[in-house]
Amino acid sequence: MTVRVGQAGLGNWGKNLARNFAELADLTWLCDADPAKRELAARYPQARWTDGFDEMLADPELEAVVIATPVPTHYSLAKQALGAGKHVFVEKPPAMRASEMEELVTLAEEHGLVLMPGHLLLYHPGVATVKELVDSGELGEIRYIYGNRQNLGVIRTNENALWSLGVHDLSVILHLVDEEPETVWAHGTSFLTPGVEDVVFCYLRFSSGKVAHMHLSWLDPHKMRRMTVVGSRKMVVFDDMELERKVTIYEKAPWKRTDSYGEWQTRSGDISIPKIPTDEPLKLECQEFLRLVSGEGDRRKVAEDGARVVRALDMLTTSLHGS
Ligand SMILES: NC(=O)c1ccc[n+]([C@@H]2O[C@H](COP(=O)([O-])OP(=O)(O)OC[C@H]3O[C@@H](n4cnc5c(N)ncnc54)[C@H](O)[C@@H]3O)[C@@H](O)[C@H]2O)c1
């Protein structure tokens, strides 16, 4: 049966979500606090329009709510929707405090509802390939991971580079290592807007001994969307700027020759480029939400994984601001 979905927020990103849910589900409501967005909503004549979130939630036929509004509104809108008995897909990050996210997870669990954060990269076929390489042991023991998310712009003035850019890489790093960081450090500087860090460097250490680093910046000459995973046997790079070589596997590793008095040597073997499906990650993400709503998959894990990201963001923010 098709899921009846209502969406709040028809801005730059929300319109992509609406396009997908109109195709994959029964999009019965569109809601935006800005009445001017009614024009955009008219593209979907099957959906009723409102500028009041409460009016949409009051529809007893509505099963699921998609939230694509600005970050500071996510927690209260998601809480209201869960309280009204609706399944929730909420753009990243679902909350700005770990305690708020825990509250949402508990609420979803108590009501038996889906709470899925919009961590788009987790549905990228390239990231899925890297995850398979990590989980299958092909890379050996994971030593460290680092992410580069840099560009000149888009310059934000109300959200720093950690919250705007870092949330993507953090969700992927935690997905790959499947652990909570034990210790984190974040250092950043605001050059353009007082109090809003344009450049942030983060370091995370896990109890298994793995470490991770993120370089986040919108003040950079390079446009980079890259994640590098260094294993004891092989190394892999996921590069989202590449069209045809999104994932590259390097058979490179250090090793010790028995006849060389324990000195480290390095070995460089084949470099391979697996074929990555070109499916749109956003469509796969929307399909996963609908699958969870229809009772398939592990809805509890999806919510818990989202909480792990918010907890790490909270720790990094404390380190960044030194309190
Ligand atoms: N997953 C991704 O790759 C990705 C990419 C871009 C943005 N996002 C996320 O999507 C969300 C929206 O970003 P955007 O760039 O579309 O922002 P935007 O400012 O363009 O749009 C937000 C819309 O929400 C509306 N709105 C605000 N408060 C509302 C409320 N209480 N009820 C109903 N509507 C309300 C605004 O009028 C606006 O139309 C953000 O959380 C952002 O982090 C995710």
Image (tube, rainbow, N blue to C red):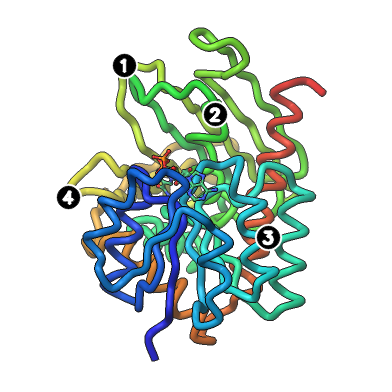
Q: CA distance from mark 1 to mark 2?
A: 21 Å
Can you identify the residue that label 3 sits on? 79
Please state the horizontal and vertical placement of residue 70, each as a whole percent of the image.
51, 41
Q: Give coordinates of residue 69: x percent, y percent.
A: 49, 47
Crowd rating for badge 3 (residues with CA inside 10 Å; few <14, some 14–19, many 20+): many
Residue pictured at 25% horizontal, 68% vertical: 45
3 vs 1, front mark: 3
Q: Which residue is mark 4?
A: 244
Q: Quadrant of residue 315?
A: top right
Amino acid found under the numbered disc labelled 4: Glu
Q: Name the one closer to the observer, 170 or 253.
A: 170
Task: Compare marks 1 and 2 and give the one earlier in the sequence.
Answer: 2
Say which mark, if any, is on residue 221.
1
Q: Amino acid at mark 1?
A: Pro
Distance from Cα at disc 3 to Cα at disc 1: 40 Å
Label 2 and label 4: CA atoms lie apart by 32 Å
Please name which of the two marks, 3 or 2, marks the residue nearer to the observer: 3
User: Could you say which is closer to the camera, residue 20 or residue 218?
Assistant: 20
Position above or below: 164 against 12:
above
Mark 2 CB in 8 Å range of ligand 1? Answer: yes
Image quadrant containing the N terminus: bottom left
Q: Is residue 237 above or below residue 163?
A: below
Q: Which residue is mark 2?
A: 159
Residue 124 in the image: state x and y as whole percent: 36, 58
| Mark with earlier residue (3, 4) | 3
Q: Amino acid at mark 3?
A: Lys
Residue that extends furthest to the right in the rendered view of this protein: 323
- Decide: few, some or many residues near mark 2? Use Cα within 10 Å; few <14, some 14-19, many ≥20: some
Mark 3 and mark 4: span between their CA atoms? Answer: 41 Å
The amino acid type, in three-letter code, at marker 2 is: Glu
